[in-house]
Amino acid sequence: MVGGGATTTNSDPNQDDEQQKRSEIYTYEAPWHIYAMNWSVRGDKKYRLAIASLLEQYQNRVEIVQLDDSNGEIRSDPNLSFDHPYPPTKTIFIPDKDCQKPDLLATSSDFLRVWRIGDDARKVELKAILNGNKNSEFCGPLTSFDWNEAEPKRIGTSSIDTTCTIWDIEREAVDTQLIAHDKEVYDIAWGGVGVFASVSADGSVRVFDLRDKEHSTIIYESSEPDTPLVRLGWNKQDPRYMATIIMDTAKVVVLDIRFPTLPVVELQRHQASVNAIAWAPHSSCHICTAGDDSQALIWDLSSMGQPVEGGLDPILAYTAGAEIQQLQWSSSQPDWVAIAFSTKLQILRV
């Protein structure tokens, strides 16, 4: 992936040809600036992603695109494109690798919405609009959400109104709503069936256990006051570790929840603000970070905990054509990472 594609050496000339044919990078150009983006998880829908627009108007768009492996083109299906109120802050496909459940896509903006992709893949229907604020027609916009892989009927949302809401999407009802922070909550991530964490403008990472809703554990607080934490990634392969981004800084803080308050390592090789983080879905010690320096960096954290002279360096670097807003690592095809910058979606083989 360094300089646009990792190279492999191979002694079999036929395999060499095959390797040449299969590109390391595929690009899709959307008709608008992309913000939200996510990989499909289903085993029968390889190379499928959802992307959403960032337009300064009420009407925005969501497209479902798929790579045609035979010709290397990522194509949008007009039947699976739809209007969306406001720009989605996040979009996620249902975590259903084995295709046991309906093909669902969730989005967050003013409300949490769940969409159903028809069995014949000819249309997308709005299945539910979930509004956690029943006392008012106004709502605190949702900054993010996470779909619980261990219990796919649960989605947790984070809001600028300081709350996190846990939804049962099968009942289309609120399981739990709690005031999570003192200020806006910017991101939420599940760490297991009943455990989630959130980050906030109050500068803290907090962990909640649904069996004891009255209490939360502060895992980290940013060292300077009024420095919001904007993104949170929980390591699915090793739930002791999580990573967070401090707003408008070029560093990523990696935390070990067994040792609160002290970062295990700080990743400081970006040249501008970091916008996105993604842990490897198949390895407990790799993480990808991306930001306004147009770089996507992959790090090997197997040495974390041991001091590294001069700080840790990434093992792979890829430079995109503009600031990278979004980054997602495919859980069903872990050798592929997707990035979004400007109007482009790129998928990169790592």
Image (cartoon, rainbow, N blue to C red):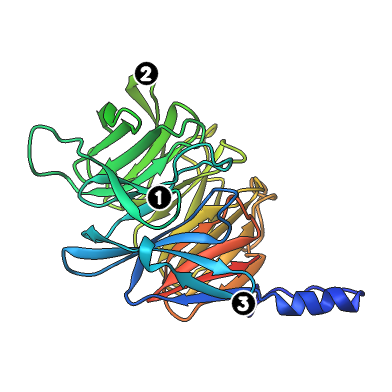
Q: Considering only order in the chain, which callout, 3 or 1, is on the residue closer to the N terminus?
A: 3
Question: What type is the residue that disc 1 sits on?
Answer: Gly
Kindly report which numbered mark, 1 or 3, lies closer to the viewer in this rendering. 1
Kindly report which numbered mark, 1 or 2, lies closer to the viewer in this rendering. 1
Is 47 positioned to the left or the right of 33 in the image? right
Q: What is the distance, in whole Å, between disc 1 and disc 2 at their CAs?
A: 39 Å
Q: Please report contact status of discs 2 and 3: CB closer than 8 Å, yes or no.
A: no
- Depth check: give the residue in front, 151 or 303: 151
Q: Can you see residue 178?
A: yes
Question: Which residue is labeled 3 in the image?
Answer: 71
Question: Which residue is labeled 2 in the image?
Answer: 212
Q: Position of residue 185 (x, y in %)?
A: 28, 44
- Depth check: give the residue in front, 236 or 128: 128
Q: At numbered mark 2, what does the secondary structure look like: helix, strand or loop?
A: strand
Q: Can you see residue 185?
A: no
Is 261 positioned to the left or the right of 41 in the image? left
Question: What type is the residue that disc 3 sits on?
Answer: Asn
Other-residue count near label 1 (Cα within 10 Å), few / some / many at <14 / 14–19 / ≥20? some
Question: Which residue is labeled 1 in the image?
Answer: 118
Q: Residue at x 54, y 42 (%)?
A: 99
Q: Please report contact status of discs 1 and 3: CB closer than 8 Å, yes or no.
A: no
Q: Position of residue 196 (x, y in %)?
A: 42, 33
Q: Residue at x 44, y 41 (%)?
A: 102
Q: Position of residue 223 (x, y in %)?
A: 38, 48
Q: What is the distance, in whole Å, between disc 2 and disc 3 at their CAs?
A: 52 Å
Q: Considering only order in the chain, which callout, 2 or 1, is on the residue closer to the N terminus?
A: 1
Q: At numbered mark 1, what does the secondary structure look like: helix, strand or loop?
A: loop
| Residue 337, quarter of picture | bottom right
